[in-house]
Image: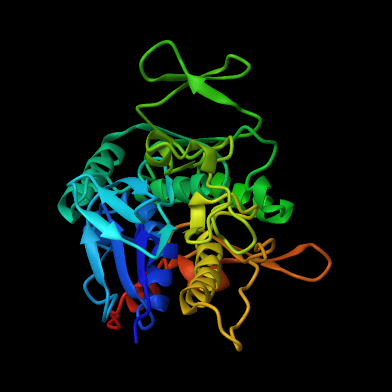
Amino acid sequence: MHDGDVVVIGGGYAGVRLAKRLDETARVTLVDRKEVFFHRIASLRAGVRPDWSQAPFIPYDRLLRNGRVTLGKVVRLDTAARQVVLSSGERLNYDVVVIATGADYPEPARFNGTTTEEAAESFAVHQQKIAGADRVLIVGGGPSGVELAAEIRLSRPDAHVTLAHSGGALLHGTGSARAGRKAQAWLESHGVEVRLDSFMAPGSDFGTYRDARGTVIEADLSFWATGTTPNTLWLRLAGHGDWLDPSGHVKVDRMLRVEGWLEVFAVGDVNDVGELKVSPAALAQAEVAAHNIRIYLSGSGRHRKQQRSYRPVRRTPLIVPFGPADGVTMLPVPGGDRAVLGGRATTLAKAKSLKVPLMRKELGYSEV
């Protein structure tokens, strides 16, 4: 029995998991502007290595048995009529709508266009630029910046690679000084120039960049791994700016509902839950939201179950690959610290496969 229409806006990690969990109990429509799921975890390697160009793309066709996936761009929520409005003019009725539009990432961890061919072509452009660059600059010493620097160094051992970070230690946002030291030691041992306390800005001349002290760094190619932006501009343009906090994230309550709206949920990178914006957290939010949506759709009843409050994931394992055969893994342990594991554990957990088989299985493709 399928009770109620649920429209999930966005087919990223949270949207896919939530749609899958509700497929047996509701009439689910997943709307995304992309024709395939984009496994962003594999995107940095795909932007460097041609043999990985297709790895991030997984079709949606096996995700839902009962529901459907619609290709389209959402431009408005008509909350009075309870309809999702697409740019094509199509309107999708909903009893519950879920905002799961994620965040926009810097290149090359971005899906450009709407088709696999367009996104793969963008990867090819990055691969060609990296292959032809003598001096490459990566700005940002968080997990993405470190991972990208390692991928480029392994692909281009003859190029001069610089990683500039505004903080005093790499991976400082993870809370593990030891992991930061391991990352810096690996990069420097492989010939990457690591510049700490270097807040970068584009220079006045093409191909030059300056830090806050005025030091000039020359580079043929640069990548800025300095953060993400929630994909909520469409909500602001549609008159729902009051749903957003100053950083552009959707404000939600403990049940992951948009504040003041019982039938509107927001999950994943797009909301204002105070936790690291990583895929395990997005999947955990999807599980709680799916439970709460089932309770909402079931209506009142003597034996009605209670909705669940979401508990932010404060301490989650973090894995930073240094290419396919090395890296650092941080595991939370009692007492507030993190255990730090090295290359062997990281290779098995993520570095070699970048979790591609796991996500293919999530979308219904069980073959390796």
Of residue 339 and residue 240, the one placed in the foreground of this image is 240
- Residue 246 to residue 316: above or below: above
Residue at the image position 61 percent from the left and 28 percent from the top: 198
Colour setting: rainbow
Of residue 192 and residue 353, the one placed in the foreground of this image is 353
Query: Could you say where residue 203 lies in the image, as x and y percent from the top left?
Result: 46, 15
Q: Going by the image, does 181 lie left or right of 58?
A: right
Of residue 260 and residue 113, the one placed in the foreground of this image is 260
Query: Could you say where residue 358 lies in the image, as x and y percent from the top left?
Result: 40, 75
Q: Going by the image, does 287 lie left or right of 6?
A: right
Q: Is the C terminus in the top left, top right, bottom left or bottom right quadrant?
A: bottom left
Q: Going by the image, does 123 lie left or right of 170?
A: left
- Residue 131 to residue 322: above or below: above
Of residue 352 and residue 330, the one placed in the foreground of this image is 330
- Residue 98 to residue 303: above or below: above
Is residue 52 visible in the rendered image? The answer is: no
Is residue 75 visible in the rendered image? The answer is: yes
Residue at the image position 30 percent from the left and 61 percent from the top: 93
Residue at the image position 61 percent from the left and 87 percent from the top: 302
Q: Going by the image, does 154 lie left or right of 217?
A: left
Query: Could you say where residue 134 lies in the image, as x and y percent from the top left?
Result: 34, 32
Q: Is the N terminus in the top left, top right, bottom left or bottom right quadrant?
A: bottom left
Residue at the image position 50 percent from the left and 43 percent from the top: 191
Query: Could you say where residue 255 lies in the image, as x and y percent from the top left?
Result: 60, 64
